[in-house]
Amino acid sequence: MKKVQFYVIADTHYFSKKLWVEGRSIEARSHTDQVVLKESPEINEAFFKLIENDTETDTVVLIGDLINLGEKLCHEEFTERLRQLQQKGKRVLVLTATHDYNGCGEDENGFVAAGYNENDTYHVPNTKRCELDEIYRPFGRDKAESEYDMSYSLNIDGYRFILLNDDGNGHTDCGLDDEGNKWLENEFIKAKENDEPVILFTHHPVITPYPVYENVAPTEMYGRHPVLKEMMMKHGVKIVFTGHTHVHTIRRITDGKSEVFDVGTTSTVSAYGKIRKVTLENGVADITTVDLPEKIDGIPGGSRQIAESCFGGYYRRLIDTAVKDYDAFIKLGHGLVPADKANKYRAVIKPALKAFSSINMSFAGKVGKKYSGLNKAEIKKHKGEKLIDVIFVILDHFFQGDAPYTPDTYEHKVIHGALLRGDRIMKTLGIKLSKYINGIDSLWELAEPLVHNTRTGCDREIKIRLTDEVTYEKN
Ligand SMILES: [Fe+2]
Ligand SMILES: [Fe+2]
């Protein structure tokens, strides 16, 4: 079978430069988002350029949340760029998702298409869900051999690519209904008969990225994901590429006979934007990660500037500023920290943050010493390391995956010990965590996947055999 290479791009959240001007209004929005909006055109362009320059890879799959919040203008500009990719010889396959539409009734998803004046927001023309088929039909569905609603299936050089639309409005399950699942199963059966290994794509996660996610946000999973997983196992379909969570992870489940992988790709416009490059050859999918290039046209500080301005980088700057210059902190926190409350509690917040920032890792080590097994000498060695730095390293990995502290590290032992002690205290006080977080009984259970990679061991890359252990039998 021919070697096939393709890119997977998730959650581009493109926002037009024509819909905002510098001012308090766009700042307020940016400070409450975990993706960058203002620089989204430059960042996505950096990835598109990289793909254009890769002459060996002719296919690009975009798996939804293409634009910010259903703004018509954003779709116009975004599809224009996709057309240019096609003109450069790229095969562009698109799925839309919940951020790509909004409106009333069925389209009511809590989003409003808006622009940003200096101090205010204003309504801009929106896109209804029913308009998306026509807008994006030239990007994949026009070549589909089979379709169900906006899901579609096509042969890519001997492989069966199936893209499942799951753009629910957030109020109910998303994903295929019963009829849709019959269609999908039929596609699996036809693919097997034609010896086409199946590669699946959808927007929402099929396997939860972190255990807590599925418990607190069940409607943010792919709808009827247990049915899909069972069907994948039954028909030997190994891989589904997903987005939505902006969490770059590789998850695996097995029933003892077969296994399924959910390869999640972070948003291009997250603090550490990434895409996936995949090679299918000799029955193996070789899945890798491509980072946002260091240098980005139009962004003087490149990828470093993005990381420092978004999510963890921004929160860290906020805390450091509060300690050094409280008035600057109030300004910097616009949109996130209410100025009146920040002023009112100045005498509490500033010293509290100062005290928190000065806690060192040897002090933290003493908290859980009884449970961590650390000795005095080891604890003393970490006097110079700050707890806040460790917390922000963990936060930095929340979306980009590969949680940083393996079980042999001092940091892992400290957090483990401290949280086991916390679990003990809660037990003594009769506090049940599961009362607040469904299905989670311990603080350590909650935190462990964020401290070290408890999934497949590496979120950046994996090689998956596509063809073994297929349990499907004809008839
Ligand atoms: Fe998204
Ligand atoms: Fe999403």
Image (tube, helix red, strand yellow):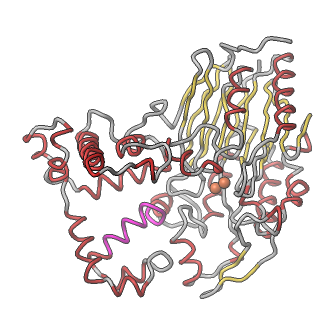
Q: Which residues are magenta?
A: 308-321
Q: Which corner quadrant holds the C terminus? A: top right
131 versus 32 height, above or below: above
Image coordinates of residue 250 in percent, x first then y, are 55, 35
Q: Quadrant of residue 225?
A: top right
Instruction: Point out the residue furthest to the front here.
Output: 430
Question: Left or right: 87 with respect to 120?
Answer: right
Position above or below: 288 against 40? above
Quadrant containing ligand 2 reads bottom right
Q: Residue at x 80, y 28 (%)?
A: 160
Q: Is residue 455 above or below residue 2?
A: below
x then y, percent, for residue 189: 84, 21
Q: Quadrant of residue 228?
A: top right
Main SS of the magenta part reads: helix
Residue extending farthest left? 377
Q: Tell which of 457 and 446 is nearer to you.
A: 446
Task: Judge whether residue 310 is colored magenta.
Answer: yes
Q: Nearer the viewer, residue 44 or 383?
A: 383
In terms of depth relative to the viewer, which is nearer, 214 or 79? 214
Residue at image point 73% right, 42% down: 60
Occupied quadrant, residue 321: bottom left
Q: Is residue 367 left or right of residue 328?
A: left
Q: Residue at x 58, y 67 (%)?
A: 298
